[in-house]
Image (cartoon, rainbow, N blue to C red):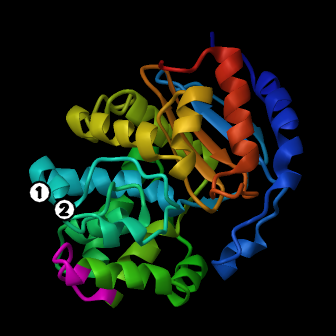
Amino acid sequence: MQCRSAEELQLLVNEAKKSSNKGKVADYIPALQKANKDTLSISLFYPNGSCFSAGDIKENLTLQSISKVITLAIALNDRGEEYVFNRVGQEPTGDPFNSIAKLETNKPSKPLNPMINAGALAVTHMIEGSSVDERFKRILKLIQKLSGNESISYNKEVADSEFKTADLNRSLCYFLKEHGVIDEDVEQLIDLYTRQCAIELNCLDLSRIGCVLAMDGKDPYTEEQLIPSSVARICKTFMVTCGMYNASGEFAIEVGIPAKSGVSGGILGAVPGRFGIGIYGPALDEKGNSIAGMKLLKLMSEKYSLSMF
């Protein structure tokens, strides 16, 4: 069963939106505080090119942690699985996404997975290029190709705001550097990382990226393999096990699709073999996930039998 109209989707948005008042927008990044917590939008993109959207679909969002999926794909292409996973683990964590605790207690001291901040910083470090600008252009170009939108850029105000308030991420970088996981200048890496997190798009762009992942890395329009199928499979697996921060287990039971959230309120979803999902709802729950977006996905999973389990 699948969604048949934008009107049908809007009814689900109206129901899910009621939970927005239980959340709050991210306040530790000043530029994100400006978001309207009542915003909720969604797009579904199908391999045949059809698309259904509902809600405040003209609103843009920044990728934030959703970018971790894209940088992992690039790093795996650049370095290969063995190199990447010698330096970043493959296990879920019950800790918050920005925690340093497991780095201190694990031996060897490497991040548990690429979807927490420490792991994402290590992965971004692995992206090849002679400068921050060159490496960022590679990330941006892939996102433009995946979304079919060459006008996508990044929000400099958000990037600058994140850069100025990234002391916890700097701490993670210095810890990683001490243990040989990274070996570049910390400020340079933070510059690249905050820019990738500030890449700005809308729900339609996000849903098309999700569709490419749902189709194992192949663009359904051009038939071009934008991400190798083996890499797309790894990315989707991490989305299932670690994509919704420390709510990933509950999300797998209640929704059951590969998904990745970001603290701007975005959610990227990829229903294997069926369609991509892009959601924006900036009111967050206590774990950093869009509270209305999570509710919307639960409603959709029940209505359209989305779970892969």
Q: Which residues are magenta?
A: 177-186
* Residue 3 visible to the viewer: no
Q: Which residue is mark 1?
A: 83
User: Looking at this view, is 113 or 210 the one in front?
Assistant: 113
Q: Which residue is mark 2?
A: 87
* Residue 27 visible to the viewer: yes
Q: Is residue 134 left or right of residue 1?
A: left
Write the residue at 34% across / 56% down. 114
Does 292 lie within the magenta span?
no
Write the residue at 18% across / 53% down. 85
User: Looking at this view, is 162 or 109 the one in front?
Assistant: 109
Write the residue at 71% across / 75% down. 27
Q: Is residue 181 left or right of residue 159?
A: left
Mark 1: which secondary structure? helix
Q: Is residue 172 above or below residue 309?
A: below
Secondary structure mostly seen in magenta is loop
Q: What's under tag 2, amino acid-wise? A: Arg
Mark 2: which secondary structure? helix
- CB atoms of marks 2 and 1 within 8 Å: yes
Question: Which corner quadrant holds the N terminus?
Answer: top right
Q: How many marks?
A: 2
Q: What's under tag 1, amino acid-wise? A: Tyr
- Front label number (2 vs 1): 2
Residues packed near mark 2 inside 10 Å, few (<14), some (14 to 19) or many (20 plus)? many
User: Looking at this view, is 93 or 251 the one in front?
Assistant: 93
